[in-house]
Image (spheres, rainbow, N blue to C red):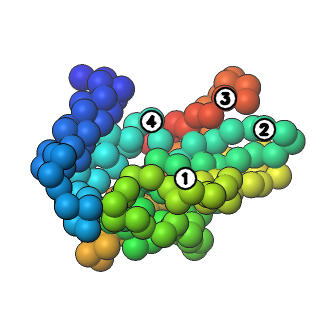
Amino acid sequence: MTGEQRSLIAVAVATALLTAGFGHGAAQTKSRIPDRAVYQAMLNGARDSGWVAFRNWNGQQLVYFTALQTLHCRLSEIRYSINSDLLDKRFELVKCNPQNPLALPSGSGLEDIAIQLPPETARTVAVQVVWDDGGQSEVMVYEPCKDVGDQTCAWPVD
């Protein structure tokens, strides 16, 4: 099974789990934050396609944390580092709305999903998430895809 097929299966499972139990009669005061297992499946599904993504745009290099930011309601921290594995930086999580846990708050901007760097700065980005229960993911290292122009892309470093 390819990485793309695993990603599609993980997203389908996560979507099914997210929608289970949220019928028309669900009280709007109840939290819709799924169990960590759903978020873990989403994280695993994005492993090969990238927990972060790179883009060269408008004279700068953008590193997107969008895939991780959608998990914000079950995360306590996103750790990362540029061109090292020190994990010495933190990407700020947006505020969680338990009624719409996968969405970013209205008014969110580029600073809520990406960092902006001078062109060609990040040769690699190492990243790890810390769950709200204190558990930690593995550390993944990504590099920009080659020959994709200004498209958004990341490639796991072996």
Between 7 and 84, which is closer to the camera in this rendering? 7
Mark 3, residue position: 151
Q: Residue 49: which numbered mark, if any?
A: 4
Q: Residue at x 64, y 42 (%)?
A: 54
Q: CA distance from mark 2 to mark 1?
A: 16 Å
Q: Earlier in the sequence, mark 1 or mark 3?
A: 1
Residue type, numbered disc 1 = Phe
Q: Is residue 156 left or right of residue 34?
A: right
Q: Earlier in the sequence, mark 1 or mark 4?
A: 4
Q: CA distance from mark 2 to mark 3?
A: 9 Å
Q: Residue at x 68, y 53 (%)?
A: 110
Label 3 close to label 4 by CB (< 8 Å): no
For discs 4 and 2, the disc positioned in front in the rendered view: 2
Residue type, numbered disc 2 = Trp
Q: CA distance from mark 1 to mark 4?
A: 12 Å
Residue type, numbered disc 3 = Gln
Q: Regarding mark 3 in the picture, which secondary structure is present there? A: loop
Q: Residue 65: which numbered mark, if any?
A: 1
Q: Position of residue 28 (x, y in %)?
A: 26, 61
Q: Regarding mark 2 in the picture, which secondary structure is present there? A: strand
The image quarter in which residue 57 lies: top right
